Image (cartoon, rainbow, N blue to C red):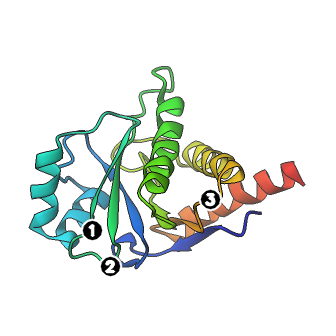
Amino acid sequence: MDPRIQVIVADITTLALDAIVNAANTTLMGGGGVDGAIHRKAGPRLADYCEKIGGCETGDAKITPGFDLPARHVIHTVGPFWTGGDRREEELLASCYKRSLHVAMDNGVRTLAFPAISTGAYRFPGGRAAEIAVKTVSDVLAKREEIDLVQFCCFSEAAGELVAARLKALDDAHG
């Protein structure tokens, strides 16, 4: 397993990394779940900044300062709504992870944490989402050296075990 990848169970808004990734909506103006928590903890300057940069397309990512968060930056990515899998949801979710990592590298971010993008209100099946996240991040890190640490920040032990199992399966497959 790539030592640069970790699975943790924590509140992503408490992490003092170069960046945390926000599972945002297309407006970037805050919402429920992780998005709302990040906006609340970052303070009103985050919404002001997001309003100026405009929205973000599904599958893309944009970076902002972290403001009142311990993380220096927030990388906002917009995951797909799960509607059964026939509307490019898997491709769009993989793009969220890939674009977030590329935005990170383009901005000198060496340590970052991802939440489970699209698995809450957007209803993406957790196991499949974990598989896509782990494979995409592993593929990017295998080709690039700029990132020192990627944490999959899970909200529960069960979610953490799901991601850890996908990491182990990927490791075993490349054994």
Horizontal side of 16 relative to 39 (left or right) equals right
Q: Is residue 168 above or below residue 79?
A: below
User: Quadrant location of residue 67?
Assistant: bottom left
Mark sitting earlier along the chain (2/3):
2
Confirm or deny contact between disc 1 and disc 2 (CB under 8 A): yes
SS for tag 2? Answer: loop
Quadrant into which the C terminus falls: bottom right
Q: Nearer the viewer, residue 98 or 25?
A: 98
- The location of residue 90, given as percent across then percent down, is 53, 32
x 50%, y 51%: residue: 101
- Give the residue type at disc 1: Gly
Q: Is residue 25 above or below residue 86?
A: below
Mark sitting earlier along the chain (3/1):
1
**Pointer 3 residue:** 163
Horizontal side of 134 relative to 103 (left or right) equals right
Q: Nearer the viewer, mark 2 or mark 3?
A: 2
- The location of residue 41, given as percent across then percent down, is 21, 73
Q: Assess disc 1: are there few (<14), some (14-19) or many (≥20) residues with their C-alpha within 10 Å of its C-alpha.
A: many
**Pointer 1 residue:** 66
Inter-mark Cα distance, 3 to 1 = 26 Å
| Numbered disc total | 3
Q: Nearer the viewer, residue 159 or 147?
A: 147
Q: Assess disc 2: are there few (<14), some (14-19) or many (≥20) residues with their C-alpha within 10 Å of its C-alpha.
A: some
- The location of residue 36, given as percent across then percent down, is 22, 60
x 39%, y 74%: residue: 11
Q: Nearer the viewer, mark 3 or mark 1?
A: 1
SS for tag 3? Answer: helix
